[in-house]
Image: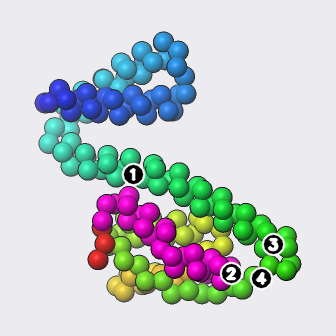
Amino acid sequence: MSFFKVLKSALFLFVFWVLLTGKFDLSSLLLGVICALFVAYAANVLLKDNLDKLEGSLAILTRFILFLGQLVIEIGVANIDVAERVLNPRLPIEPAMVKYKCHLRGEDPQTLLANAITLTPGTLTVDIDEEEGIYYIHCLADTHARNLMGRKLENMVNWVYKGVRE
């Protein structure tokens, strides 16, 4: 058991504790340190060799949390666009089905991309051809299809999984 692995895990858990509680009083911080150290030590003892595999997952988890922040911004921008289209009859609503070739490999990145597309207002992942890596996406307007083809969401998912591409 490595002291530095336990300390690194405890630090990560403590930061997570502070983010969840949002309290900075001495008793809360002290309880956070004690809990983080206990959980990190127990995980190190119980998981032993599996922690090496988990370290890669922690990096993905950290990037995923940052990805969620960017996705919330994308969803907000798309919400405003869809609301404007609904409230302003002069703005075009031109529904279309788009064929989108995905370059991500693996079920997790592909699923995350499909869900991110569906969560973004104005786009909906309707079907996926897993063998060809083609997504069939319903877009509310031409601008949504163009934004999708800019591959911003795919590049964000690719960053989360650090280069899992064809």
Residue at numbered disc 3: 86
Q: Percent position (x, y) of residue 124? A: 59, 75
Residue at (37, 65) in percent of width and height: 158
Residue at numbered disc 4: 92
Q: Percent position (x, y) of residue 71? A: 54, 58
Residue 100 within the magenta-colored segment of the rendering:
no
> Mark 3 or mark 4: which comes first in sequence?
3
Residue at (19, 29) in percent of width and height: 4
Circle 1: residue type: Arg
Cα gap from disc 2 to disc 3, whole angstroms: 11 Å
Cα gap from disc 1 to disc 2, whole angstroms: 30 Å
> Can residue 156 be spotted in the picture?
yes
Quarter holding residue 140: bottom right
Location of the C terminus (image quadrant): bottom left
Circle 4: residue type: Pro
The answer to whether the residues at label 2 and label 4 have Cβ atoms under 8 Å apart is yes
Q: Percent position (x, y) of residue 106? A: 32, 70
Label annotation for residue 141: 2
Quarter holding residue 146: bottom right
Residue range highlighted in magenta? 138-163
In this picture, is 10 found above or below 151?
Answer: above
The answer to whether the residues at label 3 and label 4 have Cβ atoms under 8 Å apart is no
In this picture, is 63 found above or below 161?
Answer: above
Cα gap from disc 1 to disc 4, whole angstroms: 36 Å
